[in-house]
Image: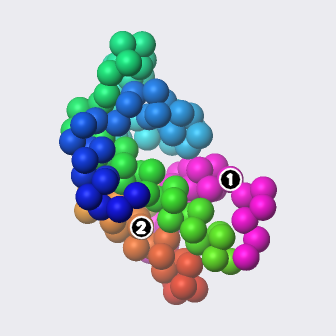
Amino acid sequence: MDPVQRIALIRSGIPATFVQRLLRSLDSKRIGLGDILKIKDQSLTRLARADRPLSQSASERIVEVAILVGQVEAMVEESGNPEGFDAAEWLSKWLDNPAPALDGRRPVAYLDTIKGVRLVSEIIGKMQSGAYA
């Protein structure tokens, strides 16, 4: 999805049902991702039942996290062996573990801001290039 399409999606709001699937695939309860993204289970369930989208700010945070999953998928595809690899599962585990590039802090703790998500994305990019991360 190009940036203009992403902006349009954010402005219109991400469907709550998509967000539920994404958070399940990321095992978000284990890593506390819902709290970090400021999305409560009850609110998400209520929006999904009513077939309503998330707010613009919540949609923006979710899009950024979905981009991280896509970044990991692209990284593995470029490595030449994507068969059987679950990018969301790998990302969920990686986000929950202390990262040397973050002075031992967990990357998931940085997902509450766009700048933090971009920092996490840069670290993933460094891993792809073989740089210390």
133 in magenta: no
Image coordinates for residue 105, horizontal then vertical, percent: 43, 61
Height in image: 64 above or below 20? below
How far apart, in angstroms, are the residues tagged by discs 2 and 1? 18 Å
104 relative position to 12: left or right: right
Classify mark 1: residues with Cα within 10 Å, few (<14), some (14-19) or many (20+).
Answer: some
Give the residue at x 48% y 76%: 125
Circles 2 and 1 in contact, beta carbons < 8 Å: no
Image coordinates for residue 52, horizontal then vertical, percent: 32, 21
From the image, which quarter does the N terminus lie in? Answer: bottom left
Q: From where the camera sits, is residue 109 visible?
A: no
Which element carries disc 2, helix, strand or loop?
helix
Give the residue at x 54% y 85%: 129
Q: Which of the two discs, 2 and 1, labels the residue nearer the N terminus?
A: 1
Mark 1 highlights which residue? 86
Give the residue at x 59% y 62%: 73
Residue 11: quarter of image: top left
What segment is highlighted magenta in the picture? Answer: 80-104
115 relative position to 62: left or right: left
Q: How many marks?
A: 2
100 in magenta: yes
Mark 2 highlights which residue? 121
Q: For this rendering, which residue is in front, 24 or 33?
A: 24
